[in-house]
Structures are given as C-alpha cells and as structure tokens.
Image (cartoon, rainbow, N blue to C red):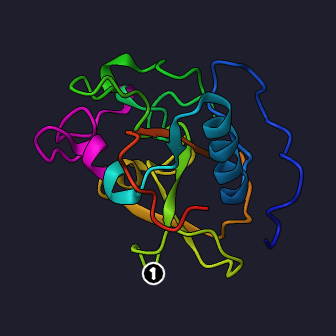
Amino acid sequence: MPGGAKQWGEQALPYANHPRENVSWYQAVAFCRWLRDKLGYKIDLPHEHEWEVAARYPDGRKYPWGNEFNATKANTSEGDSVGQTTTVGICPSGKNKALNLYDMSGNVWEWCRNKYEHPEVTAVDQSDALRIVRGGSWRPYLYNARAAYRNGNRPSVRNGSGGFRVVYRSLNTDLEGER
C-alpha cells in the first residue's frame, strides 16, 4: 500500500478528547480492523452516503444543526477558531441532536471508506485512487462544512486537519470487499 505501512504521524495535539488526526486512510482502515478483532463487533469507516445521511438527518438539512451556517456551531475558520482541532463536542449547539453526533462539520475532515470517482468501490487496494473525506475541518470555509460537500484525498495522505470516525455495523451486515 503506497504510504500505508508508515507509522502513525505524530498527533499535533495528543489529547484523549481531541479527534485523532495526521492519519492516512490505510491507517484508519487498519485501526477499524484492529478494533473489530479486539471487540468482536463489525467496526468500519462509514461509506460517504451513510456519513451524509447521518449529518443531514432527520430532514435533509444543509448543516448538522439546520439550514443556516452559524460559526458558533462548528470549529471552522469563520468562527473564533483556535487554528487547530478542539475537544470533541466543544460546540454542543452544532451537534445533530436527533442522532447525538458531535462535530459532523468542522474539527477534522473524516475519511470515508469509498473511492471518490467510484463510490461503489470500498475495498482496500493499492491504486492510491482518491478516497472520500467529509465534514470540512478547522481549516476550511463554511461551504466545506455543508453536509452534502464531498472532497477527496489520496489514501496515503496524512495531515493535521484529517481524521476519521468509526461506525458499528450489526452482525448481519455484509461488508462488501472485506477480508
């Protein structure tokens, strides 16, 4: 895997309550597999469609909190950004209340398991084709924080504004392309 076997990058803010950043897509997938084996549950990165449904739930909203951007509801460059990741949930008014999800917009870009050009492809391969990232981060602007905004990055890339979120899948869910 191009760049995938490297060690984890040093976290800029190594606090337990900050999102893990500076991790490649390959490393995020490896962590999910490790956690799956450790816990005995199906743990994975979300597909971008799952990610977007969760961020826009329950009514197709533009942002996880509603249809109007509000700089106090996410850690993005428009607000009183501290220029780095922040404690998860530091903007509680920006959470998706229906699903109790924090930081779906801002804080870090979140790796999704599918490819950018071919969203149906979720299997790990060595192509280095772009993978989806969602949610914007503390660096980009409000249009990146929209729940429908999609971006891509090479799976070997690690940076201080990119991280990941894991999802639990029921035992009867078949993970396409896994093992």
Tell me the crowding category of disc 1: few under 14, some 14 to 19, or many 20 or more residues within 10 angstroms, Cα based: few
- Residue 34 placed where, x, y %? 70, 41
Q: Which residue is mark 1?
A: 117
Q: Measuring 24% from the left and 23% from the top, which residue is drawn there? A: 97
Residue at 62 percent of width and 44 percent of height: 32
**Is residue 66 covered in magenta?**
yes
- Image position of 60 with respect to 24: above or below: above
Q: Which residues are magenta?
A: 52-72
Residue 68 magenta-highlighted: yes
Residue at 79%, 71% (x, y): give it: 1
Please state the horizontal and vertical placement of residue 116, each as a whole percent of the image: 47, 74
Q: Is residue 98 above or below residue 145?
A: above
Residue situated in front as seen by the camera: 120 or 140: 120
Q: Secondary structure at mark 1?
A: loop
Identified by mark 1, the residue type is Glu
Q: Is residue 153 left or right of residue 157?
A: left
Residue pictured at 71% horizontal, 50% vertical:
30
